[in-house]
Amino acid sequence: MKTPKISLGSWAFSFGPFESGPWSWDRFVDFSADNGYDGVEINAQAPHPHPHQYDTRAKCQELMTRLADKGLGVSGYAVNGHFPDMAAAAPATASPDQLIAALRPYLQFCTNAGIGALRFDTASPPDELEPGEYEKRFANAVRCLRAAAGAAADHGVTMMWEFEPGFWLNKPSEVVRLHDAVDHAHFKLLFDTSHAYMGAVAASRHTGAPEKLAGGTAEYAALIRDRMGHLHVIDSDGELHDDDTSTHIAFGEGYVDFPATLEALKPRLADMSWWCVDFCFNPAGPAAARAAVPYLHNLAGSL
């Protein structure tokens, strides 16, 4: 298998413990370059590059040139369901036009910058719903996401759904069901190893009966690999951050079986250029990020 390019997610240095003192974009870029990363994955919110700041092709191209001068590429652009505009356009309850309108500035940014992957989530909490309401919202989400994937295709972008405990549809069967129901080439799954552990092993924030996979993250990886378009790699200790979503701890400090999980993903990884490291909500992110690149190079070399 070819050696993957390793990117670092910028949101980890502006969310959670860094929210009161987020790293500037320049500081984050310098850190990534200085610690052996091949690229970055951009959080689409200030103080990192966002569509209201980079609102022309020329500005986006200048951004990409500055990154290239540091030897860095971009693995993807990340929007989050906690952003006010995205929360107001949650696929379960919004109209297709509302969701597309919320996504359009981010899609245009991706087009202008030449970024092909847009990370998103379902933007709704994993609340318990009556069966009729659940199916109504599920059908609405399918309509919205299929339309949004069509809009993304028009921009040359693929939407990467990051399923996680903190958002609606977080059971393995729900993840597969939604992907297959949307049934669009520009709608793919983002497999995050920490979220996968919380979904398949801890059954965290599952509504109704918990749904665990006997084979853990490796079984989950085999289940979704042909549906996967993007990868986030990070360890998990089986705990939630603020009772909401997965912790993202340093490699080797948690329970994710990386050799087995990546081996299960291997047929798909052979065609993927990027592995993105995600230290979201980790106060020790800088120290952990310094050790991540050699750790992942060793893992990839063992496959």
Image (cartoon, grey):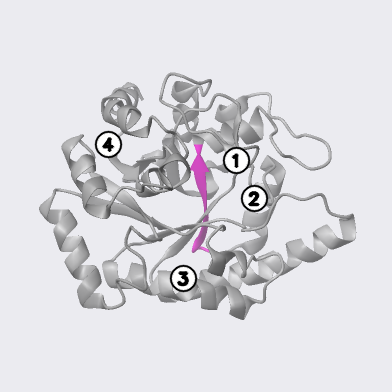
Which image quarter holds the C terminus? top left
Numbered disc in front, either 4 or 2: 2
Give the Cα distance between marks 1 and 2: 8 Å
Three-letter code, disc 3:
Ala
Residue 49 is a magenta residue: no
Structural crowding at the residue carrying mark 4, measured as other residues with C-alpha within 10 Å and reported as few (<14), some (14–19) or many (≥20): few
Residue identifier under label 4 = 2
Three-letter code, disc 2:
Phe
Asked whether the beta carbons under mark 1 and mark 4 sit within 8 Å of each other, the answer is no
Residue identifier under label 1 = 245
Secondary structure beneath disc 4? Answer: loop
Pointer 3 or 1: first along the chain: 3
Tell me residue 76's x, y (percent).
36, 55
Structural crowding at the residue carrying mark 2, measured as other residues with C-alpha within 10 Å and reported as few (<14), some (14–19) or many (≥20): some
Quick check: 268 above or below 41?
above
Which quarter of the figure has residue 35?
Answer: top left
